[in-house]
Image (tube, grey):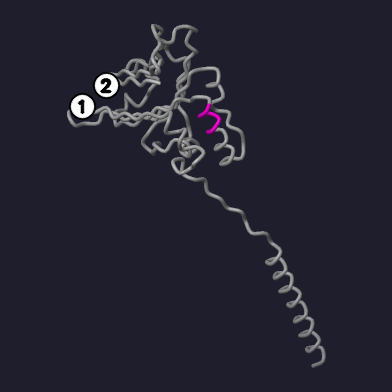
Amino acid sequence: MKRIKNASAHLAFALSLLSGSLLTACVSSPEPEISHPLNALDDPDFAPILKAVTQHFDVIENFETKYQVHITHLTPPFRESMSRRYERIFGEPLTQVAEASQKVGFFVTLFTGNRDLIDLDNKDVWTIKLESGATKLDPSRIERLRPKERWAPFFPDINKWSQEYLVLFDLPPKGSQGDAKSDIFFNMNSPAGSIRSSW
């Protein structure tokens, strides 16, 4: 009987130590830090700049929407604001649009049910031009961007049916710009309809 009492005492002592260590671990463990980025349109440091450099177009014929397009001009102020937001969200510098600093760049979100139209790099369907004064330039690069989850925090018009593109042009020759306040034009022409955005 004495041995049983001793065994019970040892067991009780071991359990008390275990519960004490678990309690200490629970008390001393730091709370996880969880944060969620603001929606792009709710971010006071980002939303005004995004709105200032983005244009939206619905191309409709006979009450049928042929395509929708959202064009963001990657101006220096916008790239700076986007880079700050990108680093806050992903914890690393933004490098994907670095080439735009030496070019004229646009981020294009295209939505259409037409499989031919969804490929902006299809030259049989699309003619993309940058117009500055008398100069018309073809894109130096059209890149389809993936994954869309990486870009959605910056461009709120992205959805699971849209397709996103980075469109770059070489800088227009000096002196080719027009005299108007908006002296460059981004033109998208297709059999389904054409748009001309001014900047």
Which element is circle 2 on? Answer: loop
**Relative to 130, is 49 above or below?**
below
Residue receiving disc 1: 61
Q: Is residue 79 magenta?
A: yes
Counting from the top left corner in percent of width and height, residue 116 is at 32, 24
Hey, which quadrant is residue 68 in on the image?
top left
Counting from the top left corner in percent of width and height, residue 188 is at 34, 19
Q: Determine which of the numbered discs, if any, sits on residue 193 in the image.
A: 2
Pick whichever, 21 or 55, lies toward us.
55
Instruction: Point out the stretch of residues depicted in magenta.
Output: 77-82
Q: Amino acid at mark 1?
A: Glu
**Relative to 31, is 19 above or below?**
below
Pick whichever, 69 or 12, lies toward us.
69
The residue positioned 25% from the left and 31% from the top of the image is 65
**Quadrant of the image containing the C terminus:** top left
**On the picture, is 169 further left or further right than 180?**
right
Pick whichever, 35 or 164, lies toward us.
35
Reading the chain from its start, which is encountered first: label 2 or label 1? 1
Count of numbered circles in the view: 2
| Alpha carbon separation for disc pair 2 and 1 | 8 Å
The residue positioned 44% from the left and 7% from the top of the image is 176
**On the picture, is 120 further left or further right than 174?**
left
Q: Amino acid at mark 2?
A: Gly
**Quadrant of the image containing the N terminus:** bottom right
